[in-house]
Amino acid sequence: MSEALDILFTASFWVAAIRIASPLIFATMGELICERAGVLNLGIEGIMTVGAFAGWFTVYSGGDLWTGVAVAALAGGAFGLLHATLTVPLGLSQHVVGIGITLLATSLTYFTYRLALPQVTTPPKIEPFQPLPIPGLSKIPVLGEALFSQTPLTYLAFATVAAVAWVLYRTPLGLAVRAAGENPAAVEAQGISVTGIRMGAVMAGSALMAVGGAFLTMSAFNSFFFQMINGRGWICIALVVFGSWRPGKALLGAILFAAFDAYQVRLQQISGGVVPYQLFLMMPYILSIAALVLVARRATYPRALMIPYQKGER
Amino acid sequence: MRLEPRPQPPLGVLLLYPLAAVAVTLALVSLLVLAAGASPLSVLGLVLKGAAGSQFALMETLTRATPLIFTGLAVAVAFRARLWNIGAEAQLYIGAVVTVVLGTGALPLPSIVLIPVIMIAAMAAGALLLLGPTLLKTRFGVDEVVTTLLLNFIALLFVSMLLEGPLKDPTGLGWPQSSRVVADAQLPRIVTGRRLHYGFVVALAAALCVWVVMKKTVLGYEMRAVGHNAEAARFAGMPVNSVLAKTALLSGGLAALAGFSEVSGLKGNLTLDLSPGFGYSGIVVAMLAMLNPIGVVVSAIFVAGIFVGADAMSRAAKVPSYIADVMVATALLTMVTALLFARFRVRWR
């Protein structure tokens, strides 16, 4: 039993937790921006797949790592544009379009992978982002190793949370985004286009989701394989609800979730195969559902979430 | 730009736009085929030949359509009441698990009794699996999209656990697979020597039943009312939560039948690749059919034809068979867009 508790005090556990949290942080922020503007983006799972492939493939074809991140973001933004065009000005069902985008993005990725690498059996590897310890700070015991000895993409994830929070709460643009998700008519009354704000939010959010996917192939692992997103996108949708649509709380949720995920892997090792490993693997999904049940009653959804807006219509 | 409803869409428009959607889909997919270095026309020919070019091909298509009819009906029923069941995949696997548990010799019954018993039990399991998220929605306000999606992953891990534990085939040489169901638990083949089985007939009957329920019963009327406007339905005195619960039981049960028919009619046992995403394809099938139960049969055969045809094509031409998934997803997006333009007129100003 004490063995199970000891895990919590090892630096390697927290390093892993922050690493597992990083892709979730990007994608959760992406989904949060979309939903804050009033659009549920169920394309997230597919867009993460696209990002994972686009970033990895760019590096595999000779691009440098940051170019890979940019390409992933652009690819995500492109799918965001498709999603936004169908759901915002055309007002199609966000559920149906989102699932459609996930199916399209995933199958297009797999098709391209097979086309580009027809013969491979083991996925080729790239040289991923390396840990970049921050001088001084990384020497703090446990905390320093967990937070300040990560790869640059993890630092970017944390910076993204700060940027999203600052834009949402401290800038006129953020106010317009939040209002577009609460009371779009008020945004239009200010002479700002709800359509423009929502489409921009979905594209920016989708770009972040794709970077989240790219983290997996370019920082956490070093190659692309099928089904590697494995429901992370859906978990991020749960994290947005759990974080009550606030960047800080969502960040906390992502870290808690990742800590739990890192913990179940270690628990699995010390349980010595008595308990089926699948039970451990189920835990993150069950935890997500449990978290939703806990917060659902007092969740205050953005009031215009999933409600299409037509100018001049009441 | 704004969208104005067409008071009475002319028949020409209603026909023209879906055809345009098909044309756009074919054009986009042709670009991918060109990128793969093949000729779109010859690839299209190979797909058509592989899907319907012979009696064998046609039967393969109908065999593949069978689970899609069940999951398509499951989605159509749920979406009609705006219950977003994205978990048909999980319900399918639970149906398959029940089929294996009861069908591998646990019940010494004659076929005529055994098969209905297994069907009812499988449907009950699938129904309960969807009832959970639905109650979480109606009691606690938990969004069913996320819960049903996450249950797909949980269900697959659960099946994996069973296949490496209690349901493991002792003669399986370490492969994660279950024992085969006994002969009395198997749905017979329609034509000897072909894979098409009576699951297809059950699927057609299910579509007819769902059509009757949706069009001719109070429950069907209530489901449509709840889907159209839950608030108004509540105001009119309809028990919205209980309607949603009944919808969930029906939808989950239908999806579970897909698992039953795949095991009992086609595969004979349960493996982790029983369903290559039939639950998700069911969403496309239902949307292409505009949630109409009879339309589901047609669109399931259409979607199955794409998959079967693309499989055959990719063996002949060097185009990855994932082109089928791309085509189906593109068809979904172009079709919902086309149907919108058929019902609304775009006014620029």
Image (cartoon, rainbow, N blue to C red):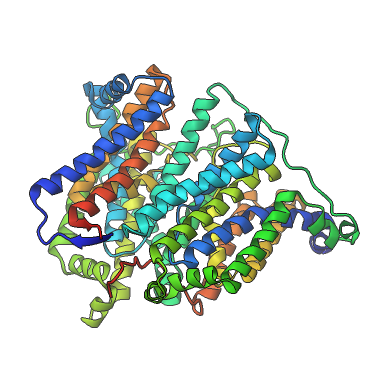
Work out whether B159 lies above or below A33.
Answer: above
Q: Is residue A209 visible?
A: yes
Q: Quadrant of residue A61?
A: top right
Residue A209 point in image, percent of width and height:
55, 52
Q: Residue furthest top?
A: B316
Q: Tell me where residue A158 appears, x and y as whole percent.
A: 69, 60
Instruction: Give how far across and how far down residue A11 sits, in percent.
Output: 84, 57
On-image quarter of the N terminus of chain B: bottom left
Tell me if B270 is positioned left or right of A308 in this view: right
Residue B118 appears in the figure: no
Residue at 63 percent across and 40 percent down: it is: A68
Up-down relation of residue A71 to residue B192 (above or below): below
In the image, what residue occupies the spot 47% across and 58% down? A200
B251 to A104, vertically: above or below: below
Q: In the drawing, does residue B5 fall left or right of residue A56?
A: left
Q: Nearer the viewer, residue A307 or B303?
A: A307
Q: Nearer the viewer, residue A161 or A275?
A: A161
